[in-house]
Image: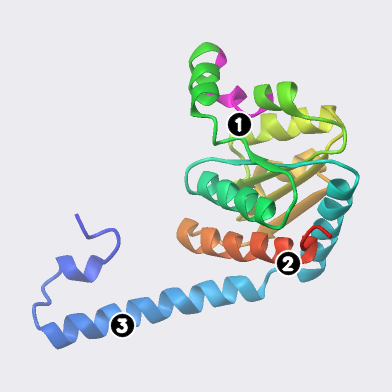
Amino acid sequence: MTEFLYPFLEGSETDLPTVLADVRASTLQKGADTIALRLRIDLEAVVACGEAIRAALERGGRLLTFGNGGSSTDAQDLAHDCRALGWPALALVDDVATITAVGNDVGFENVFARQLIALARGNDAALAISTSGSSRNILAGLEEAQRQLLLTCAITGGDGGRLRELELDHLLVADGDYVPRVQEAHATVYHLLLEVVGAKA
C-alpha cells in the first residue's frame, strides 16, 4: 500500500536508523526536485500574465478558474485568494450540481465550456490549471473562452501539451513530468500571479 510513496519501506530494510535515513534522503530529494522546477519558472511570463489579469479585473471583469483533480483544488485556492484581495473570482469546479449534471447529460468534456457559455462576460479572464495540458474539458473550456474573447491563461506542466496549440494569451509551463512536483510548482506560479495582481485599491 505504501510502495508508491515510499518504495524502500516495502523492501528488506528493517533497521530503524536505515529506514529513517532513507526517508530523510527521499524527502531531501523531493525538496531539491521542487526547488529546481521552481527555479525554471519564467518570471517575466508570470508578470505579464498577472498584469493582464489585473487589467481585466480593473475593467470590471472576473477571474474564472478551473482544473481537474489536484488542479481543481488549486483553481479553488486561486479564486479564493483572489477574492481575499478584493477582486471578483469564481472557481468553476465549485458548483458540483452543474458539473455532475453537465457531465451526465452532455459529457464531462463539456463541464467547463458549458459554464462559460452561461457565466462569462466580456472582460473576464479564464485561467485553467492542468498538469498534462491535454485534458479535453480544459481544452474545450479555453476554446469557449477564446470564442467569447476572454483573456485566456493556463498553467500547465511537461511540454505544455495540447494547450500549446490553442494560441492562448498566456501559457505558463512548469516543465516537469512528475505530477506531484509539477503541482507544487503550479502553487508557486499562481501565488506569484496573485502577487502581481495585488489587492484592489
Residue 79 is marked as none
Q: Which residue is mark 1?
A: 136
* Quarter location, residue 102: top right
Q: Residue 173's spot in the image, x, y percent? A: 68, 58
Q: Is residue 198 visible?
A: yes
Q: On the rendered image, what quadrant is the C terminus found in? A: bottom right
Q: Residue at x 54, y 36 (%)?
A: 94
Q: Residue 47's spot in the image, x, y percent? A: 81, 65
Q: Which residue is mark 3?
A: 24
Q: CA distance from mark 3 to mark 2?
A: 33 Å
Residue 195 is marked as 2
Amino acid identity at mark 2: Glu
Q: CA distance from mark 1 to mark 3?
A: 39 Å
Question: In the displayed structure, would residue 123 be above or below residue 109?
Answer: below
Q: Residue 131's spot in the image, x, y percent? A: 56, 50
Dot 1: few (<14), some (14–19), or many (≥20) neighbours within 10 Å? few
Q: Earlier in the sequence, mark 3 or mark 2?
A: 3
Question: In the displayed structure, would residue 163 be above or below residue 201?
Answer: above
Question: Which numbered mark, 1 or 2, is in the foreground of this view?
Answer: 2
Horizontal side of 188 relative to 13 (left or right) equals right
Q: Residue at x 75, y 68 (%)?
A: 42
